Each structure stands twice: as structure tokens, then as C-alpha cells.
Image (cartoon, coloured by chain):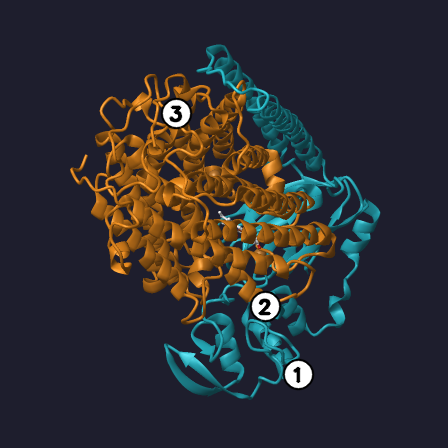
Chain colours: A cyan, B orange
Amino acid sequence: MREQASTFAQGVDFSLYVIAGISVFFLVGITVVMLFFVFRYNKKRNPVATNIEGSHKMEVLWTAIPTLLVMVMFYYGWMGYKPLRNVPAGALEVTAYGQMWKFTFEYPDGRITDSLVVPLGKPVKVNLVSRDVLHSFFIPSFRMKEDMVPGKNNFLWFETTQKGRFDVLCAEYCGQLHSYMLSSVTVLDQHDYEKWLTSSASVADEHPGLSLLKQNACLTCHSQDGSKIIGPSFKGIFGKTETVVTDDAEREIVIDEAYISRSIRQPNADVVKGYMKGLMVSYETVLSEEQIGHITDYIKTLK
Amino acid sequence: MSSVSTNLNFFEAKKGIFSWIFSVDHKRIALLYLYSLITFFLVGVTLGLLMRYELLNPGKDLVEAKTYNQIFTLHGVIMIFLFIIPSIPAVFGNFFLPIMLGTDDVSFPRLNLLSWWVYVVGALMALSTLVFGDGPADTGWTFYAPYSVKTGTNVTMSVLAAFVLGFSSILTGLNFIVTIHRLRAPGMTFLKMPLFAWSLYATSWIQLLATPIVGITLLMIAAERLLGVGLFDPSIGGDPILYQHLFWIYSHPAVYIMALPAFGVISEMLPTFSQRTIFGYKAIAFSSLAIAFVGYFIWGHHMFTSGMSGTARFIFSILTFLVAIPTAIKVFNWVATLYKGSINVQPPLLYTLAFIFQFMIGGFTGLVLGALATDIHLHDTYFVVGHFHYVMFGGTGFAFFGALHYWYPKIWGRMYNIKVANVAFTIFFIGFNMLYFPMLIAGLMGMPRRYYDYLPEFHLPNMISTYGSWVLATGLIIMLSNLVAGFFGKKPKVGRNPWNGITLEWQTLSPPPVQNFDRMPVLPQNGPYDFDHKPVIEE
Ligand code: HEM
Ligand SMILES: [Cu+2]
Ligand SMILES: [Cu+2]
């Protein structure tokens, strides 16, 4: 098991120990009794069997005991789970976006990151949004996950109990690179957290187009070095002549500003030959005219 | 009973391939199912071994990510729809239900043949995805929307295959219900039926009532992909959570389609190898019905992290725990059946004991997943993969192979090599636990399922698991070759009743004649397992 890094983890582990404890006790007990019977009443030792039809007393007993025990298990499971739905007032709210195959996080001040940074011991509520298919936001060290469902607003919240960096994994299968959809939560103490908040990050010296590509998970499918991932690479595509499939018919086009803009807004209108339709979602409502301009400028630099 | 007086056994009665594939004899249909099922099982196992090989080390070992995703989907589809759902009912139910009821066939023999043909067509459809277009579906056997609507792989064909296979299951269920109601031997009341018949009865109702729901749901996926009807994909106005509800309304009860028949064969083998009556006949019979009934109301436990309301989570969790009670009752009664028996340790009993042990692990890990707090951590991790293999493979799979060893002499009239069977069992059992126990650990550590690649911290359990898969495969090869050898070999013919069993199939010839009985079967006086008044059977 991993470290318990959130207040929720204790409740989960406690109910796990209760259930596992009872289970191991019965598993071992029943197995031992079973093997003992096989040994003791082996036909060599017991050539003549005794027919016992059953026993009402025993049936009542072994109905009542499991009933009691499963209710105990249910109770601890429920108690351990309950805190997850009651977000304390004043929690820091962050929105996590899931998208094939990347998590991005948006802070109240508009800052966008690809990993989560939170202050130690402060409640944090994470709103979960999917931009395409199902994902699940899973932090094993916090013992929690909740699905990111397109069209539905889910959330979870946690309060951290130790500093450090913890894995975030996507737990709901989301296609080809599901197992590479990883991120992390870094827990800082209040002082370091505030420093991080006020730092203007390293984003500044990056091309704004590149930052946008990173924030929107474009680069999980489109490489910058010519290699084919899920979609065509961005390297050297500007000005190139390409065969695309439009409404099931092939045609030749030259990649220009208008084509790039159209590919971002209606990705399935023209699909480059040899690639799969339907995997990229429209960024119509996500990216502005100006941002698409930045991206196009950046793609032009990839020779 | 039919008036044919020849005692030719059902193998000899007619020859030629057409006398098999168009046979309406329930015994031949059962064997058609057996051979097709085992074939698909071996395909599924091969895919499983490929997956395990890929997961031996982090990073790529064998195949690309997309291929891996297609492999686990095809593995799941084959194992669920082509192997485990039909398994015990279609093979041993078809063969032995009529004989155990003392009759000469099921109620609708032609429908029975049709169900096999429908099964074959469905299976070919599922496998056809291998050879055209962009290959087999890569969605997981659950076909969750909206990914299943978006991906370019052959999802449409896969869901249509599952749709067709559903009909095969419905037809078998219908046939068994009518057979049990109408064709019991004179004097065999419901409470004098063997427990295998009881378990098939409960199973058949689930097949009949739940399968249409998944059929419609899968058609909806096909409609959405082909016609763009917005049902499940929110970008065209659908609701992905609706899909999950519809899918699990069938697929949770389907877990009992897999488990109940296994409970049935276990309840047959225990009395035979203990040479005494089953403990708590009524408790076992009625708990099957209770499980079938409660099983309809707990599907939501597959969706505890999907954002359901707290109330829904509460209700689904508590109902899930309730279904554990009738299951526990069965286990206690089985173990009590060994008490003061005269126990004959033979391969089928070994599979039975392994079944009880592994099924308990499957059940207990199910309780861990049914509790809300722990499920929030373990949902969609390898813990779930370990859990359902313990139930479906360690439970039903082992019961299936136990049943094969149990009824083998009756079906083929010869015995396999018992020593080799014991060795094979031991290797198989060790391999099984080595393969799946580490998955439970990987899940507790937080490794998600459907994972082509993993972080280095998950390496150890994955390595052990992969080694386990090789041990298991070794055991399986020995087991199957031993069975095949027994059937071609020179082993002497067995008599009517090599295990000294008491249900009616042991009163007839091995293999049974075409019309099942060469003389009128005699019911034991007080119920099916009344070893005190076991009818004397002459060869
Ligand atoms: C040699 C035997 C087997 C091996 C090595 C094996 C291995 C595996 C592995 C590694 C996975 C995990 C895929 C993943 O999450 O990435 C898996 C999934 C699965 N297995 Fe098996 N398995 C075997 C037999 C069986 C049997 C007998 C059944 C059913 C009776 C079964 C049913 C399933 C199902 C339903 C899935 C889920 C597929 C999905 O996620 O869509 N397996 N198996
Ligand atoms: Cu994902
Ligand atoms: Cu379920």
C-alpha cells in the first residue's frame, strides 16, 4: 500500500482493514475446516458416511452471522466514504480537465498547469471536466478517484496530510494512450505554495503558441519532430500539400492558415488520409481567434 | 419415453459430420457446444498469455498500445460471451439436465440446435473483426460510450456479435425453463430435483429476462455509430451514464448467469464424493433463487465513481452486501456436506475444493469492492481484474473443468488417467493463484486496469503474475492432453457408475443410448441425494 497522504485515506484504509480482517478470518477458518473434514472423513478413516439432511439451527446461525457482518462492513464503507461528498466551505477550487491523454488544471486566477500544486492541510475541491471521452481522476496516495464524464460536472475534494509529490493516474479506459495519461499532485507548505502562486512561472519565455499546444493536450497526439502518434505531426506541415478525406471523398489541399483554423474548429471535416476520424474534438468553444493565430504562428516555426 | 428399443449409444447411432451439426439430440448439441467453447477458450487464453507477456516489464515487450487494447477487448468478449456465459448450461446443462430429470430430450430440440447455430454465427461475427477494416474493437468488453461511439475500430460488428450471441443464450434459457416445468420424471417434484436443475432454473430466468436489455443497449450503440442518433455521446446530445446503467442492468445479473450453474455442479459433485446427502438441500435451492432475484438490483455498484448521487450509492452498496448472504449460506452448506461423509478424493473433488477456496476469495474481494470507501480507491484498478478472474475463472472456470472430469466417464464411457489429472490440477491451481493474487496487490497499490504500460513501482506483482500465467498454461496443457488421451487411448471402458453417484444419469449406460435410458430410471425414495435408499443398479 502507498502512504496515506490525505485525511480521506485513513477512512478508506480503516474500512479495508475491517473487511479484509473479517474476510481473512473466514477464508482461513472455512478452508481449514474443509481440509480437516477431507482428512478426517476420508473414506479410509470413515468407510461409512452418515446422512445428515441439514439443521435448522445451523442454517439460522449461518444466515444471521453473515448478515450481521456484512452490515458492519457496509457501515464502515459508508462512514469512510461520507466525507467525500461534504466539501468544507472555503475550499480552494481548481478545475481539472481530462482529455485524451492529458490532465490540465485551471486555478481561480486563470493560471493553467499540467500538474496540480496544493497547499498542505487546506481543503481543495477539484471540479472534474472531460473534453472528450470518459476519464477518471485517480490519486492512489489519497485513496480516491472520481470519473470525468463529458457533459456532467463531477468533483472530489481532499485535505492533504503530508508534503510531497503524488501520482495522478487516469483510471477509466480512454483509448490508445490511456496508460500514459499521468500527472501529479505536489503538496507544498503554505509558505512555498504562496511563493509558487506569485511566481510568474516559466511560461513567459515560451512561444505562446507552444504553451497553448501544451495546455490543450494537442501534443499528446501531434508530435513536433515528425513522428506519427495519433494525428499527423506538426513538423513542416505549413505550406505542405496533403491528401485529405472530405465526406468520404479524397482531395488535395495546401495547408494554410484557413486550413489549420478549420482543423481546430471542425477536426472531422477534413481528415488527412491514413488517420482516424472522430478522435479529435472541436476546440471551437475552447480557443479564441487570437489563440488559434498564436498556434498557427508557432506551427509555422516548426520546419 | 421414446419407444426405440436399440441401445446403440449416441455416438454410434449415426455417423458423419451432418449427423452432428444438424443433430437435434441434446447430447450431441452439448458436445458441439463443448468443442466450440473449448476452442474459443483456448483462443482467449492465448490472448491472455500475450497480455501477460506484454506486462512482464514496463515499456513495450511485444505489441503496440493499440494492439494491446484490441487484445484485451477481444479476450474479454471471447471469455465472457463465447466461453463463460454459455459454458456450464450449454454443455453440461444440455447433456445432463434431461437425463437428470429422467426424460429423453429438452422440450424444444430444434430450438436447441438453432441456439447452437446462432452461437456459431455470433462467434464468427466476433472473430470477423480480426480480418477487416481497422481490426477488433479497442473499447474493452464493456463498450463504454462515448469512446465506443468515436473509435475507428470495428465496434459495430463486435456489438452486433454480442447481440446475436444474446439470442443463443435466451433460447437455451427458455428451453430449460420449459423442460424443467414440463418434463420431470413422474414422481420428481420440484423439491426432488437435483440441485443442478435448480441452479439452471434460476439461471434460465436471468437469461430470459436480462439478456434483452443488453441486446437493445448494444443495438443503440450500433445505431449511434451508423446513424448518428445522439443516445450516449454528449457531443450529439446523449448521456454516457445512461449507457452504463443499461449495460450493467444486464451485465451484473450476467455474473449470476456465470456463477449459478457452477454452484449447481458443485452441489452435485460434493454428495457424490462424500457419499452422503447434501447438507441443507432447501437452503441451497432457494438461495439460488434469492441470488437471482437480488442480483437484479445491484448493478449500480459498477458505477460508484461515475458521479451517482449519494443516495444511489448508499442503496446499491447495501443491496450488494445483501446478495453476499445467500452466497455465504451456500458455502457453509457445502462445507457441512463433507462432515461425516466418506470422502473419496478424486480429480473432480479437487476442483470442487479449489472452487470453494477461490470463489471465497472472489466473494470477499467483492465485498471490498462493494463497500463505498474502499471502492473509491479500488474501482477500475487491477484489484477488480483479480477479483473477477477469481470469480469467473477460479470459480466458474474451475467448476467447468471439475464438471468435465466428473461427467467425462459418463459422456465417453472411458476414464482418463487419474494420476496425471491430479498432477495437472495441482499445477493449474498453483499457476492460477500465482497469476491472479498479485493482481489484487497491484490494484491495492493503485495500478489501473486496461493498462498497456505501467509505472516502475508496479513491476514486481506484474512479473510474478506473468510467471504464474506460464505455470497455469502448463497445467492446462497437461490437463487437456490427458483428457484427449483418455478418449483416444486404450483405457478400459467404465461401467454405468464409476463414482458411485446417485442422480439418474448414473443409472444409464456410459455413454448413454440415444433415448438416454435403457431401462426405466428409479428415483431414490427421499429426494435426489438419499444415499440411505440408493437404488441398486446392475450393470
Ligand atoms: C490464461 C488465462 C487468462 C489470462 C492470462 C488472463 C489475463 C488477463 C489480463 C492480463 C487481463 C487484463 C487486461 C487489462 O486490464 O489490461 C484480463 C482481462 C479480462 N479477462 Fe482474462 N485472463 C485469462 C483467463 C480469463 C478467463 C477464463 C476469463 C473468463 C472466464 C477472463 C475474462 C476476462 C475479462 C472479462 C477481462 C476484462 C477485459 C476488459 O477489460 O475489457 N479471463 N485477462
Ligand atoms: Cu483518460
Ligand atoms: Cu456487479
Q: Position of residue B510 (x, y in %)?
A: 35, 40
Label 2 close to label 1 by CB (< 8 Å): no
Q: Nearer the viewer, residue B413 or A287?
A: B413
Where residue B149 sits, quadrant-wise, is bottom left
Residue drawn at x 33%, y 53% as measured from the top left: B119
First reached walking from the N terminus: tag 2 or tag 3: 2
Circle 3 is placed at which residue position? B285
Q: Position of residue B419 (x, y in %)?
A: 57, 42
Return the chain for callout 3. B
Residue drawn at x 47%, y 24% as measured from the top left: B275
- Cα separation between marks 2 and 3: 48 Å
Q: Position of residue A62 (x, y in %)?
A: 53, 18
Residue drawn at x 53%, y 82% as measured from the top left: A257
- Quick one: SS at disc 2? loop
Q: Residues within 10 Å of mark 3 (few under 14, many from 20)?
A: many
- Cα separation between marks 2 and 1: 31 Å
Circle 1 is placed at which residue position? A301
